Image (spheres, grey):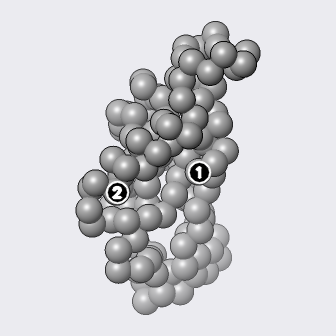
Amino acid sequence: MVKQTEFSLTAYPRGFHLITEEVLRQTGPLPSEGLLHLFIKHTSAGLAINENADPSVRVDFEGFFNRLVPEGLPFLTHTIEGPDDMPAHVKSVLSGASVSIPITGGKLNLGTWQGIYLCEFRNYGGRRKLVATVYC
């Protein structure tokens, strides 16, 4: 069986944001066993799984990504949408557009300190559309 849900997140500011609970609200009850595949339908934001307890981890990710791919690089040619746009595309490639999580006992089988991140790389990215597919 396959169940697919498409939904939008409210607009988040630039940065790394835990969205695990929102994803669970949108997907509804999970099967006893299976797989959740989550995909973001954007090229300037990404998804990741990482630390869900200490918010400083998300701050450090933001700082690291901004140092790795800063705005205003002189060789960038795709600049019409603003100085944060092309760096956001590059960061999106680095973070990825999807995550897959096993479902066990009707719950996401994440590690103790793991959560799902929305990686928002634009200053004003707006609402982000996600597709959640549950396979069981």
From the image, which quarter does the N terminus lie in? bottom right
- Residue visible at 27% across and 55% down? 55
Q: Nearer the viewer, residue 118 or 134?
A: 118
Residue 31, relative to residue 43: is it above or below? below
- Residue visible at 58% across and 76% down? 35
Q: Nearer the viewer, residue 50 or 73?
A: 73
- Residue visible at 66% across and 44% down? 93
Picture coordinates of residue 66, whole percent (x, y): 48, 36
Query: In the image, what residue type sits under mark 2?
Result: Val
Q: Which quadrant holds residue 2? A: bottom right
Residue 1, relative to residue 125: is it above or below? below
Picture coordinates of residue 12, whole percent (x, y): 36, 36
Q: Which quadrant holds residue 45? A: top right
Picture coordinates of residue 9, whole percent (x, y): 41, 42
Circle 1 SS class: helix
Q: Which mark is residue 9?
A: none
- Circle 2 sits on which residue? 57
Task: Classify residue 51 as left or right of residue 35.
Answer: left
- Residue visible at 72% across and 19% down? 75
Task: Classify residue 135 as left or right of residue 108.
Answer: right
Residue 27, relative to residue 130: is it above or below? below
- Circle 1 sits on which residue? 95
Asked whether the viewer can see residue 98, the reply is yes
Picture coordinates of residue 89, whole percent (x, y): 63, 33
